[in-house]
Amino acid sequence: MFRRGGFGLTPPRFITFVLSLILAFAALASLYARLPVVGTFVNAHRVGIALAAYAILMLGVLLRGL
């Protein structure tokens, strides 16, 4: 609903925000704690998971209805 420049920005849906928050928290938590179930994958791909969290949030802002 915010119109600036050539495209409109919209707030992301709640589920998009929560998914992004969970991914970012998992990437950050893997630095300081052991994650029991998905810990090895998160430790190996921590930067990619953090980037994916940001990309999901960015798409939620840029694309209407995501």
Image: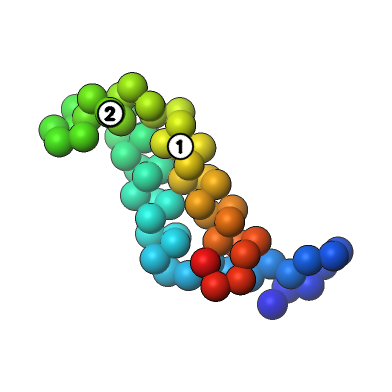
Q: Quadrant of the N terminus?
A: bottom right
Q: Amino acid at mark 1?
A: Ala
Q: Residue at x 44, y 60 (%)?
A: 17
Q: Is residue 5 left or right of residue 51?
A: right
Tell me what residue is drawn at x 38 percent, y 27 percent.
Answer: 45
Quick one: which residue is furthest to the top in this view? 44
Tell me which corner region of the image, top left, top right, bottom left or bottom right, holds residue 44: top left
Return the x and y of residue 10 as percentages of the image width and height.
Answer: 63, 70
Determine whether, in the image, residue 34 is placed left or right of residue 14. Answer: left
Mark sitting on residue 41: 2
Q: CA distance from mark 2 to mark 1?
A: 13 Å
**With respect to residue 53, does 49 lie above or below?**
above
Q: Amino acid at mark 2?
A: Phe
Left or right of 35 on screen, residue 56: right
Q: Which mark is residue 42?
A: none
Q: Which mark is residue 50?
A: 1
Circle 2 crowding by C-alpha within 10 Å: few under 14, some 14–19, many from 20: few
Residue closest to the far right: 5
